């Protein structure tokens, strides 16, 4: 399939040339997530500018190791949400989560919202790889909750 080949290319491109990689300061929240079924690991930091849901995601920095899907996902995600408000970024996260839970059925991802993240549509057909694609997003959600002081 032409579309799947194109999506594959997007994922490989992010894997080979990850955006925003490396742990940076300052940051208000950090999370370390592991996907034991695949061996993926990510440490992710969030730097917010402002307070609460209207705060701007000023930076997302991370250190990731593991499969190409998990690493490409961290790259795509950070590029997508840096500069958005927490509220907007949460909406993007929910859209991506919905795409991953579609199991390839009727997956009509909103390209305006997800941009390069639509490339992971094919991943939703492989339950074992869904956690790889979601790892960085879950770490981001966790780190953001910590930055906002919502988690203990
Ligand atoms: Zn993986």
Image: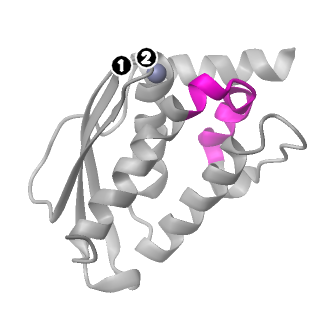
Q: Which residues are magenta?
A: 115-130
Q: Which mark is residue 39?
A: 1
Task: Judge from the rendering whether residue 10 lies leftward or rightward of residue 39; answer left or right.
Answer: right
Please state, as top left, top right, bottom left or bottom right, where the C terminus lies in the image: bottom left
Which residue extends farthest right? 106
**92 is higher (above) or lower (below) than 50:** above
**Residue at 61% of width from left, 41% of height from top?**
117
Q: CA distance from mark 1 to mark 2?
A: 8 Å
User: Residue 5 at what x, y percent from top left?
Assistant: 75, 15
Asked if disc 2 is less than 8 Å from ligand 1, the answer is yes
Q: Please, what secondary structure does the residue beneath circle 2 have? A: loop
**Residue at 40% of width from left, 82% of height from top?**
53
Answer whether residue 120 is magenta in the image.
Answer: yes
Question: Which sits in the foreground, 80 or 124?
Answer: 124
**Residue at 36% of width from left, 35% of height from top?**
19
Answer whether residue 119 is magenta in the image.
Answer: yes
> Which of the 4 image quarters holds residue 82?
bottom left
Q: How many marks?
A: 2
Of the numbered discs 1 and 2, the one sitting upstream in the chain is: 1
Q: Is residue 58 visible?
A: no
Task: Judge from the rendering whether residue 128 lies leftward or rightward of residue 71; answer left or right.
Answer: right
**Residue at 43% of width from left, 39% of height from top?**
135
Q: How is the image coloured?
A: one colour
Q: Please, what secondary structure does the residue beneath circle 1 have? A: loop
Task: Judge from the rendering whether residue 117 lies leftward or rightward of residue 21; answer left or right.
Answer: right
Which residue lies under the disc numbered 2? Answer: 67
Please state, as top left, top right, bottom left or bottom right, where the N terminus lies in the image: top right
Q: Is residue 112 visible?
A: yes
Mainly helix, strand or loop, the magenta region? Answer: helix
């Amino acid at each position: 399939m032409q579309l799947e080949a194109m999506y594959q290319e997007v994922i490989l491109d992010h894997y080979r040339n990850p955006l925003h990689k490396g742990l940076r300061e300052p940051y208000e929240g950090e999370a370390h997530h592991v996907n034991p079924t695949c061996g993926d690991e990510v440490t992710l930091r969030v730097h917010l500018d402002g307070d609460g849901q209207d705060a701007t995601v000023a930076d997302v920095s991370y250190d990731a190791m593991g499969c190409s899907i998990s690493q490409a996902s961290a790259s795509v995600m950070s590029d997508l949400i840096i500069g958005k408000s927490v509220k907007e970024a949460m909406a993007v996260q929910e859209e991506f989560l919905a795409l991953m839970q579609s199991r390839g059925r009727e997956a009509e991802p909103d390209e305006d919202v997800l941009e390069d993240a639509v490339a992971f549509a094919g991943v939703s057909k492989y339950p074992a790889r869904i956690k790889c694609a979601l790892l960085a997003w879950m770490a981001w959600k966790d780190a953001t909750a910590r930055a906002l002081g919502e988690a203990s």
